[in-house]
Image: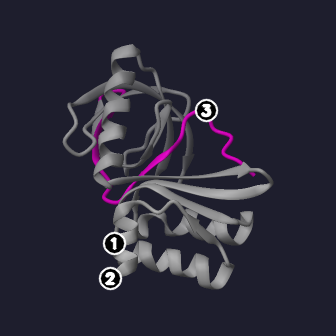
Amino acid sequence: MTEQRKHQRIRFNVLPPVRIGQFGLAGTGALENISLGGLLLRTEMPLKVGEAFGCEFTVFDSPLIDMSAVVVSKIGDRYGVRFQAGPISEVLIQDAIDHALASGKASVLSINELQGRKVMRIAGGLNASLRSDFMHSLTRMGVDEMDLSGVTEIDNAGLDLCRIAVEQHRVGIVRPSSCVRALMAA
């Protein structure tokens, strides 16, 4: 099964804060993930599904991103949000995503089929924040290879995930980035 979303979701190792407001109420939350189309937000503030609200946030050291969004889903204290973004906001979001991936503070995991083989591709940080998606991909989707060429930061938890993939699931690692090679050699 391949990713069916229009925009790739970016997960964070440390959840960036977000300020929100709806119907005259103001609150805070944390970004679980973001894409060009929206975000997944955790907050105790009771947002109304189907209604617009304002949000402002930075992705680590990005410029302030301030926009309107619509709540499209709610599960517990998590809200799925679709942006009502214009071209300038989209550029700011893409720049923030690119910088977070390059610094290893955010991650993307995708599954693609290539010549009949399922390839897991990871870009950005390979760390404990990917554990759930990583293990789901290994155990439920059946991965043949891992392309780690886009990994910009890896820690011991990420290395442990690689070991599980190779030793327990017989997944081959292709194109490891220099930081992956360095940690594996240590």
What residue lies at 73% left-to-right and 50% top-to-bottom?
A: 113
Q: What mark, if any, has residue 109 been given in the picture?
A: none
Q: Earlier in the sequence, mark 3 or mark 1?
A: 3
Range of magenta residues: 1-24
Q: Which residue is mark 1?
A: 182
Estimate the x, y position of residue 119 in percent, counting from the top left.
Answer: 66, 57
Query: What amino acid type is highlighted by mark number 3?
Result: Lys
Q: Which residue is mark 3?
A: 6
Disc 1 and disc 2 in contact, CB within 8 angstroms: yes
Q: Nearer the viewer, residue 24 or 142?
A: 142
Please name which of the two marks, 2 or 3, marks the residue nearer to the observer. Answer: 2
Instruction: Based on the picture, tell me whether residue 3 belongs to the magenta stretch.
Output: yes
How many numbered marks appear? 3
Please name which of the two marks, 3 or 1, marks the residue nearer to the observer. Answer: 1
Q: Residues within 10 Å of mark 1 (few under 14, many from 20)?
A: few
* Picture quarter with the C terminus: bottom left
Q: Residues within 10 Å of mark 3 (few under 14, many from 20)?
A: few
Instruction: Based on the picture, tell me whether residue 180 belongs to the magenta stretch.
Output: no
Left or right, 86 with respect to 167, comes to left
Estimate the x, y position of residue 41 in percent, counting from the top left.
Answer: 42, 46
